[in-house]
Image: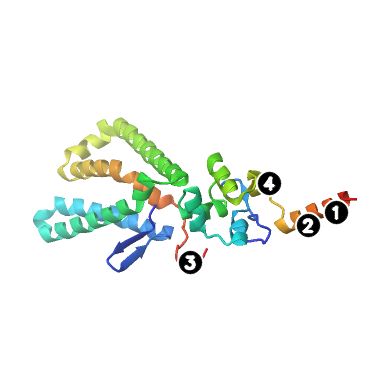
Amino acid sequence: MNTEYAIGNLRIRFESRTRRRWLVAFFYASLAALDLAARTIDTTGPLILIVCGLLWVALLIVISWLVDNAWTRGDEREMQRRDHAYYVAYRSLLWCFVAGFLLYPGVLRPLFASYFWGHFLRVAVCFLIITLPPAILLWTEPDMEDPRQPS
Amino acid sequence: MQDNGSQPKPGESGLYNRIAVLRAERGISRQQLADAVGVNYQTIGFLERGGYGPSLKLAFQIAEYFDLPVEAIFSTQPLKPLSQQVYASSQSEEKGSP
């Protein structure tokens, strides 16, 4: 896993787990805001939609960069962590799908039928499948060492 | 950390090791060791703190790098201080010699 994101001379460090958790929280908050803005564009206007969209894309780029190393050419520990993140993510989603299947007739069908919640749930499901494993990896990886410190 | 080369606790991995003390003794940085055994330098840090138990392959690679038997570096039991172990072996050699 990379622990630093550089934009020009600005270097944002992510050795701290707390900081990575804030990143994940902001990412999902911006996704929810983007989805909400898209649903209420008539009243909020396109500017809010564009701002939310840009923020979400920026956070997605940062998250992709941070986990890229573990995804492509990680060592044995990184691959173990990655596999564990996939396992936890897809096992959790599987249970959500099972619960959704059981609850669909009574609870979820009216929600999916409604314009607002139906769209919200579809977007949530689509993006969770894609983004949950890296989010779990960033959330659970312990504090790391700052490479600038002498070892 | 104790100066005996072993971690005070085995950590999540359940293994004690002497990587940190061997590195310090030979003046090797985490990055140098990581490059030599083909892992991320963060992984060396996790190994030293007992946060990660290495595969058999990695354990042997580290042992080969330090030119020591693997049981001299990794143990499931708390490792004795290196100085104590060296002194004990030299004492036994002296007693054994005519």
- Provide the chain ID for the residue under circle 4: B
- Crowding at dot 4, Cα within 10 Å, few <14 / some 14-19 / many 20+, comes out as few
Q: Where does the image place residue A79, in percent across and percent down from the top left?
A: 43, 43
- Provide the chain ID for the residue under circle 1: B
- Provide the chain ID for the residue under circle 2: B
Which residue does the numbered mark 4 point to in the structure image?
Answer: B77
Which residue does the numbered mark 2 point to in the structure image?
Answer: B87
Which residue does the numbered mark 1 point to in the structure image?
Answer: B94
Alpha carbon separation for disc pair 2 and 4: 20 Å
- Crowding at dot 2, Cα within 10 Å, few <14 / some 14-19 / many 20+, comes out as few
A104 relative to B98, above or below = above
Alpha carbon separation for disc pair 1 and 3: 43 Å
A59 relative to A108, above or below = below
Q: What amino acid is labelled 3 in the image?
A: Gln
Instruction: Tell me if I can see residue A45 in this picture.
Output: no
Residue drawn at 87 percent across, 50 percent down: B97
Alpha carbon separation for disc pair 4 and 3: 30 Å
Q: Earlier in the sequence, mark 4 or mark 1?
A: 4
Q: Where does the image place residue B81, in percent across and percent down from the top left?
A: 71, 56
Of circles 4 and 3, the one toward us is: 3
Q: Earlier in the sequence, mark 2 or mark 1?
A: 2
Residue drawn at 50 percent across, 51 percent down: B36
Q: What amino acid is labelled 1 in the image?
A: Glu
